[in-house]
Image: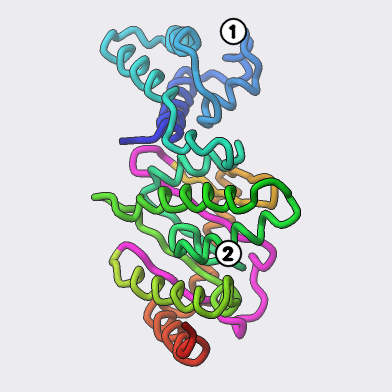
């Protein structure tokens, strides 16, 4: 079942299509309906929930009068306002990350570049706990309680890997992320073993970007490109320490796709990467318990 986040994006995409079909600019729609231009933009990008009165007003403006089509839009609007499972973690999940979790839950394809970390969907529980514990240093409060909650959320996010139609995930991971013993040698050994098991699946791949590759265009950032089966276009997600960016402009997406393709070319092949990880395991973590 599609998440409310993806349903809002689908609804927004359809409304944008209808607006463009009538030859209207977003600003003129805002003026005619008494909306702000920002509201129209947020509706079309799926960043806000939509009231039934608003959807009816927009559909009337766009000349949609077929009763069956109207019912479909109203049904989609109602479903898009439902709570996603991740809202149960609102106590530990920042608002800016809730949107990403909803998008990830229904992505058909994820292309990911990671500079410092193993991708979240590929992390073992102990590896993720070590990451969370380090990220919460200095924040006070019940650190271990927060680590527990974030770990539970991470495990639930990973359920997408077990769907009947799991996403295709292509990850490029910096060599540094695999060489850094997060949580200690034992935790890292189990993490690499887990990765080697995961990449046996036909829908998952990991390419290691070696230090010998030299300079590249994404040295200062990690990013993910998400694609969906029934929503046109792609979305780029870039995360910072206390906020995130969602990029949907064609130029931004094209640039990130170009950089990802270049990183893929610079990285080892999936087979070479698996061999490299197995060698790292043997040389660095063989005797750790």
The percent position of residue 136, horizontal first and vertical second, equals 67, 54
Relative depth, front residue between 189 and 158: 189
Which secondary structure lies at badge 1?
A: helix
Magenta highlight range = 203-232
Give the class, few, some or many, for how many residues have Cα within 10 Å of label 1's Cα (few <14, many ≥20). few
Labelled disc at residue 130:
2
Q: Earlier in the sequence, mark 1 or mark 2?
A: 1
- Give me the residue at 48% from left, 43% from top: 101
The residue that mark 1 highlights is: 32
The percent position of residue 55, horizontal first and vertical second, equals 46, 13
Residue 90 is inside the magenta segment: no
- Give me the residue at 45% from left, 82% from top: 277
Labelled disc at residue 235:
none
Residue 230 is inside the magenta segment: yes
- Left or right: residue 129 versus residue 276 is right
Residue contact at pointers 1 and 2, CB within 8 angstroms? no
Which secondary structure lies at badge 2?
A: helix
Q: CA distance from mark 1 to mark 2?
A: 53 Å
- Give me the residue at 30% from left, 36% from top: 1
The percent position of residue 89, horizontal first and vertical second, equals 51, 39
The percent position of residue 244, horizontal first and vertical second, equals 64, 45
């Amino acid at each position: 079942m599609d998440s409310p986040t993806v349903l809002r994006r689908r609804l927004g995409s359809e409304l944008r299509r209808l607006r463009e079909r009538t030859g209207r600019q977003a600003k003129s729609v805002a003026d005619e309906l008494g909306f702000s231009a920002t509201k129209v933009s947020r509706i079309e990008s799926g960043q806000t929930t939509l009231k039934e009165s608003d959807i009816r007003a927009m559909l009337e403006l766009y000349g949609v009068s077929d009763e069956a089509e109207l019912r479909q839009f109203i049904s989609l609007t109602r479903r898009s306002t439902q709570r996603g499972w991740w809202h149960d973690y609102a106590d530990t999940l920042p608002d800016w990350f809730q949107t990403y979790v909803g998008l990830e839950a229904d992505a058909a394809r994820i292309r990911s570049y990671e500079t410092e970390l193993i991708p979240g969907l590929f992390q073992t529980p102990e590896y993720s706990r070590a990451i969370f514990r380090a990220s919460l240093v200095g924040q006070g409060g019940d650190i271990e309680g927060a680590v527990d909650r974030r770990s539970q959320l991470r495990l639930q996010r990973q359920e997408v890997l077990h769907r009947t139609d799991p996403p295709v995930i292509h990850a490029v991971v910096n060599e540094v992320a695999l060489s850094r013993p997060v949580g200690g040698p034992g935790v890292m050994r189990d993490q690499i073993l887990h990765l080697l098991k995961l990449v046996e699946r036909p829908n998952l791949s990991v390419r290691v970007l070696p230090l010998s590759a030299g300079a590249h265009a994404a040295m200062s950032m990690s990013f993910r490109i998400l694609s969906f089966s029934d929503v046109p276009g792609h979305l780029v997600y870039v995360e910072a320490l206390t906020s995130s960016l969602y990029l949907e402009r064609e130029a931004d997406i094209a640039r990130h796709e170009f950089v990802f393709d270049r990183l893929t070319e610079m990285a080892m092949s999936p087979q070479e990467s698996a061999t490299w990880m197995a060698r790292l395991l043997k040389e660095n973590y063989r005797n750790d318990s």
